[in-house]
């Protein structure tokens, strides 16, 4: 077959969110590709500048549907740092418990998606069923299943009663057993081995060169985890280790995530059993002093960075969000070349892309049938004009 | 057989009408068993039928620049082929239309849907459909050779090219699943690949190429193509039941002839259903392999094992016959 252009996305069954790969394939082998990630810009960074510290937290919770707690935690952590607040120990523990439960439901979701990408729908259905247990726990603890709304500047909004702690602890043994089953499946099931081994290989040097983060980097042998390197919340107290793997392929990324499921479960158990007494929040000042903070956080997908600039007001002067997916995209584009067309879904899924967090903007002119990307300067000018006209800022 | 009785046989029972009903029933069973294995509820009993009726009523869209007549006729051809194939597969005792060589005809007719899928993919002028079509024929060349070889095993051993006679041979001898277990397993794998079920759903891999050749099929064309695959499932499992599991002939005879026939029919249902359960379990327990991996697997193991099986049959034949 001659070279053909296969458009993967922006609408495609393998993709849950819009992204576009223009793949040039020679038969089934990918020769080269173009990556276009700009389909769903929502202007959240700009909108954050218009809201005070109370109202901005629910907004940031909506950056991502899976790691909603990550975005609020990293933000309030940064603001608390700017205000020089030391929040109560109990609040830190509750934040940690929710964060690790979030990691568990995210990794279980990922395992299901990866299985679905290779057509193994039974595992998909099973992991998503067990993910329900995690979500039920989150609902009992926070009152919500997706956007937990537990964080605020100065602590958490909801305390855990002894009954809730007991109920959560009671759910853990079953989950642990299921996770063990999946760990066995991931390392033994024939078709999964066939489709995951040697696919999307990234050496340690490449992983460092392209700036990968999270499980993608750790599967290539890079020991990099913000929870260990720059401990925050209650991670310094909990017994856990950074999971790494040397396969560097999709198989390695699966093993890392399954291993992290175990570790997260242990952190949650430790947190629930050793929950300190005391208040869960303190009254923060209204305004934050002038400061520039780089707040780092290990989201389920990797290192999440919020750059926050405050200026003696009750709003952020500037907020910049660097999501882990953005850090991992380059490695995907590089590893895809030379691979089989059939491996695109699983390689893309292996970084667990979260596009709603990542996207910027593309302008589509339907009459002239062209698309073009806005430069940073144009986008900035547009944003300032838009908000000046619409919200009078 | 009387002409009107033959017409009844072809059109009503156990011909087309029964075939359609049974195809829907097997589709329902397939979906329900899959669902229960995945801890889901599964569809209600009439869902396959409802899906079919719904699709019939949907708008038929022909992509621009596509040969409308060929595109519309292709699913009909596939459907007609598998329906015809069923007439030669024994359901109640032997088939009245049986002749020497109907095994070859049935195998040929069962291959047609795959070729039609390739044709549809090629006609669609859609990159996903074309890729899927190419994958469909590539896959066909991989599984078809071992599949044909092992199905010829029973024919060689029984000394007949007629499915009905092979069934009769097994009434007085052990079933071929005992005599040629290797052939039986390879035949099941081949059937799974022919029906494009996981792990061989490479041509229609949803997450890779949308729906493969099916991408541009809509309305009644899609309905017909789905029905073709369901009927293929019935014909394929009936064929394997006839060749390896003794088909619809019961080892005991009962006095009123109709009682024997009814028992045979019950055995037919039981055996085809059993084969479906095996196929569904395999489908649920695996992911999809890649076309190059299937190529290795098919030619390295399946084809050589199938040849070994045929060789064994030939040697045994020479040994036992005077």
Image (spheres, rainbow, N blue to C red):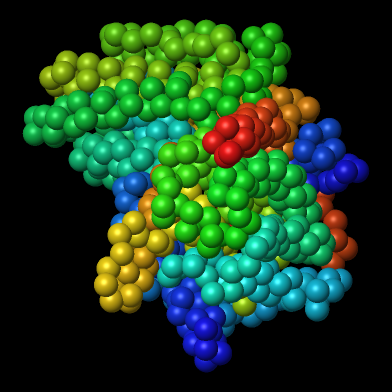
Q: Which of A161 and B188 is in front in this view?
A: B188
In the displayed image of the protein, which residue is found farthest to the right? A2
Q: Is residue B87 above or below residue A76?
A: below
Q: In which quarter of the image is the N terminus of chain A?
A: top right
Q: In this view, does A379 lie above or below B231?
A: above
Q: Which of B255 and B167 is in front in this view?
A: B255
Decide if residue A143 is in sight here. Answer: yes
Q: Position of residue A94 (x, y in %)?
A: 25, 26
For image coordinates 16% across by 18% down, the residue present is: A273
For image coordinates 80% across by 77% down, the residue present is: B68
For image coordinates 80% across by 78% down, the residue present is: B69
Q: Nearer the viewer, residue B185 or B132?
A: B185
Q: Where is residue A180 in the image (x, y as percent from the top left)?
A: 32, 23
Image check: A246 left or right of B179?
right
Q: Position of residue A185 (x, y in %)?
A: 41, 27
Q: Which of A117 and A235 is in front in this view?
A: A117
Image check: A22 left or right of A386?
right
In the displayed image of the protein, which residue is found farthest to the bottom? B4
For image coordinates 49% across by 73% down, the residue present is: B19
The picture quadrant where one finds residue A242 is top left
In the displayed image of the protein, which residue is found farthest to the left? A163
Q: Where is residue A362 in the image (x, y as percent from the top left)?
A: 74, 49
Decide if residue B221 is in sight here. Answer: no
Q: Is residue A116 above or below residue A76?
A: below
The picture quadrant where one finds residue B96 is bottom right
Q: In this view, does B261 lie above or below B35?
A: below
């Amino acid at each position: 077959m001659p070279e053909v252009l296969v458009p993967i996305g922006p609408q495609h069954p393998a993709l849950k969110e819009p992204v576009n790969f223009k793949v040039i394939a020679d038969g089934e082998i990918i020769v080269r590709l173009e990556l276009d990630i700009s389909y769903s810009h929502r202007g959240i960074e700009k909108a954050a500048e218009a809201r005070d510290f109370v109202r901005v937290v629910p907004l940031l919770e909506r950056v991502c549907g899976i790691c909603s707690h990550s975005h609020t935690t990293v933000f309030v952590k940064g603001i608390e740092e700017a205000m020089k607040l030391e929040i109560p120990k109990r609040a830190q523990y509750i934040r940690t418990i929710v964060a690790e439960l979030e990691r568990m439901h995210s990794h279980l979701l990922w395992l299901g998606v990866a299985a679905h990408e290779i057509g193994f729908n039974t595992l998909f259905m099973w992991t998503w069923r067990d993910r329900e247990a995690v979500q039920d726990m989150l609902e009992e603890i926070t009152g919500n299943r997706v956007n937990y709304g537990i964080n605020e500047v100065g602590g958490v909004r909801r305390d855990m009663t002894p009954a809730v702690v007991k109920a959560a602890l009671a759910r853990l043994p079953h989950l642990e057993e299921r996770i063990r089953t999946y760990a066995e499946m991931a390392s033994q099931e024939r078709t999964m081995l066939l489709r995951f081994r040697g696919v999307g290989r990234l050496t340690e040097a490449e992983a460092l060169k392209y700036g990968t983060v999270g499980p993608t980097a750790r599967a290539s042998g890079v020991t990099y985890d913000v929870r260990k390197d720059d401990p925050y919340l209650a991670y310094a107290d909990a017994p856990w280790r950074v999971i790494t793997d040397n396969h560097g392929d999709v198989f390695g990324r699966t093993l890392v995530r399954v291993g992290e499921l175990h570790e997260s479960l242990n952190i949650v158990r430790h947190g629930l059993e050793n929950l300190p007494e005391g208040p869960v929040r303190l009254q923060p000042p209204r305004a934050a002093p002038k400061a520039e903070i780089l707040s780092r956080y290990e989201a389920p997908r990797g290192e999440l960075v919020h750059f926050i600039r405050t200026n003696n007001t009750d709003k952020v002067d500037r907020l910049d969000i660097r999501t882990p997916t953005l850090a991992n995209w380059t490695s995907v584009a590089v590893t895809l070349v030379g691979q089989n067309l059939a491996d695109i879904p699983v390689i893309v899924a292996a970084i667990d892309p979260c596009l709603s967090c990542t996207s910027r903007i593309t302008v589509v002119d339907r009459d002239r049938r062209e698309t073009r990307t806005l430069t940073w300067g144009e986008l900035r000018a547009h944003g300032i004009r838009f908000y000046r006209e619409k919200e009078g800022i | 057989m009387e002409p009107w009785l033959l017409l009844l046989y072809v059109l009503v029972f156990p011909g087309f009408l029964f075939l359609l009903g049974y195809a829907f029933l097997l589709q329902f069973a397939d979906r329900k068993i899959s669902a229960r294995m995945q801890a889901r509820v599964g569809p209600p009993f009439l869902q396959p039928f409802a899906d079919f009726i719904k699709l019939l009523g949907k708008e038929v869209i022909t992509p621009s620049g596509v040969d409308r007549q060929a595109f519309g006729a292709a699913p009909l051809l596939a459907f007609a082929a598998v329906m015809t194939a069923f007439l030669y597969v024994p359901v109640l005792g032997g088939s009245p239309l049986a002749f020497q060589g109907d095994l070859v005809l049935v195998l040929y007719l069962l291959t047609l849907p795959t070729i039609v899928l390739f044709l549809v993919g090629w006609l669609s002028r859609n990159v996903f459909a074309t890729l899927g079509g190419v994958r469909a024929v590539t896959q066909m060349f991989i599984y078809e050779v071992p599949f044909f070889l092992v199905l010829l095993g029973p024919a060689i051993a029984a000394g007949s090219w007629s499915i009905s006679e092979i069934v009769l041979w097994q009434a007085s001898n052990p079933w071929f699943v005992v005599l040629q277990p290797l052939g039986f397993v390879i035949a099941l794998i081949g059937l799974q690949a022919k029906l494009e079920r996981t792990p061989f759903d490479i041509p229609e891999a949803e997450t890779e190429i949308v729906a493969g050749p099916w991408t541009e099929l809509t309305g009644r064309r899609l309905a017909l193509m789905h029905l073709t695959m369901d009927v293929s499932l019935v014909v394929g499992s009936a064929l394997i039941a006839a060749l390896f599991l003794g088909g619809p002939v019961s080892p005991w005879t009962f006095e009123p002839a109709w009682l024997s026939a009814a028992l045979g029919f019950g055995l037919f249902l039981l055996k085809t259903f059993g084969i479906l359960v095996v196929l569904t379990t395999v489908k649920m327990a695996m992911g999809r392999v890649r076309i190059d991996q299937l190529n290795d697997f098919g030619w390295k193991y399946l084809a050589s094992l199938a040849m070994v099986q045929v060789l064994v049959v030939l040697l045994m034949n020479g040994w036992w016959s005077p």
